[in-house]
Image (cartoon, helix red, strand yellow):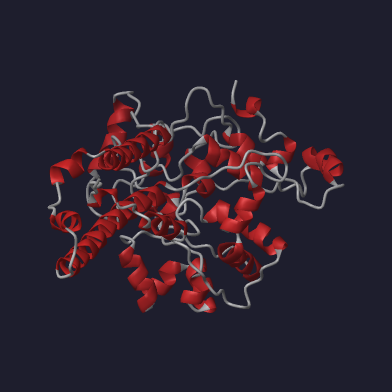
Amino acid sequence: MSIKRSLLSVPLRLSNLALVFFLFVGVQAFAADPSVPDSDEAITAGRSLFNANCKACHRLDSKSVGPALRGVTERRDLEWTKQFILNSQALIQAGDQTAVALFKEYNNTVMPAHNFLSDDDLMNLLAYVEYGDTADTSAAAGAEGVDGEVATGGVPSEYLTIILGVLVLVLLLILVVLGLIVSVLSKYLEKQPLEEDDREFISQKTDWKGVFKSDAFILIFTTLILAFVVKTALDGLYSVGVQQGYAPKQPIAYSHELHAGQYEIPCQYCHTGVEIGRSANIPSANICMNCHTHIQNVDGQDGMSPEIAKIYAAIENDQPIEWVRVHNLPDLAYFDHSQHVKVGGIECQTCHGPIEEMEVVSQHSSLTMGWCIDCHRQTEIVTAGNEYYDKLVQLHSDTKESLRVKDIGGLECAKCHY
């Protein structure tokens, strides 16, 4: 009795090769400059610097606002890299071709200067960039941190998109290769002496209608559709309440670049509550008039600027300027500016980004709970000259690690939630 066979019954063993391919997609090996330290102390110190100054725009192994950083000391000269970190705009204005090309590639995004970093800070930062948070160390840490803390992070959304795209491409390539193999084998076997049943099997035409109705095709197609739907849904859920990049139009075209940047007016001059209370305060028109009683235009132009005229109109009509709030936290979260700025000594730019370079203010950081918790885990407390911390420092003296916000209750739910 002859057995009917079909080309559709050939097992796709190459799928195993595809799986191996995906396991190694994106794996890159970099040879860092040998002068970059790889000690745990340097990497730990560099992680704190990275989280405080770089994390908002950069990732180690993937593009963000700026390029992926790991391997930078292999791609670039070490001294050039240091200069770029300290003041990228100085290199750009000097006509450095590499710096200018990077500036153009990333949409002329201005990277803030970090002149306050010492050479040791730069080497520690590069130690973390080259050797910190690799796949091996994160896998060894497991689902929990060293202190039993829940590990944060996951597969970036960009990686999921790339993986799904490559998956579709590889499947299509497999089908094309299998089709070519079947075609070549069929032509070869047609020239060989075969029994009638075998020749009938070789000569049969592909039933494309049957292919599309087959269980295997339906399963693969449904899986891909579900993967895209699930990814889209997860991206949407993770973005709920996140307003990073939000830059509403204001009633007056106020430029922080002009006031805080060019004229170096301290943030505290206008935002008077930042050191004494929970809110930073949006300045009233009276504060604006401290300067604009005498300054009525820019660059010595004649007459009154239309934007400054709006301040005068608000004063004359006794109407407040209806500024649009840019940074919004949910009602369930409590944040105290004075605790961070006055007590903690946190710079405004740590959360708000290079505000002195913004013509139009936008939300620089994500301001998510994970973002805040990560800061509390990494930020070292400046205890020098502050008697408030003397007892805490004494209690923490048994450990070799520096005192961080997490050590004084910075991860307790009630600290931020009522």
Q: Along the horizontal axis of the image, is 11 left or right of 350?
A: left
* Depth check, front residue: 166 or 219: 219
Instruction: Quadrant for residue 119, please give it.
Output: bottom right
Image position, residue 193 (x, y; %)? 17, 68
Q: Along the horizontal axis of the image, is 215 left or right of 196?
A: right
Q: Quadrant of the N terminus?
A: top left
Image position, residue 84 (x, y; %)? 47, 70
The residue sitting at the top extreme is 418
Q: Residue at x 44, y 57 (%)?
A: 62
Q: Along the horizontal axis of the image, is 264 left or right of 303?
A: right
Q: Residue at x 24, y 47 (%)?
A: 2
Instruction: Quadrant for residue 98, please give it.
Output: bottom left
* Depth check, front residue: 50 or 169: 169
Res 104 visible: yes
* Depth check, front residue: 53 or 69: 69
Q: Residue at x 84, y 38 (%)?
A: 391
Q: Quadrant of the C terminus?
A: top right
Whether residue 75 is situated above or below residue 57 in the rendered picture: below
Q: Residue at x 64, y 65 (%)?
A: 124
Q: Along the horizontal axis of the image, is 37 left or right of 368?
A: right
Whether residue 293 is situated above or below residue 158 in the rendered picture: above
Instruction: Quadrant for residue 185, please give it.
Output: bottom left
Image position, residue 167 (x, y; %)? 34, 52
Image position, residue 334 (x, y; %)? 56, 27
The residue sitting at the front extreme is 1
Res 117 visible: no
**Total label count?**
0
* Depth check, front residue: 153 or 223: 223
Whether residue 411 is situated above or below residue 10 in the rendered picture: above
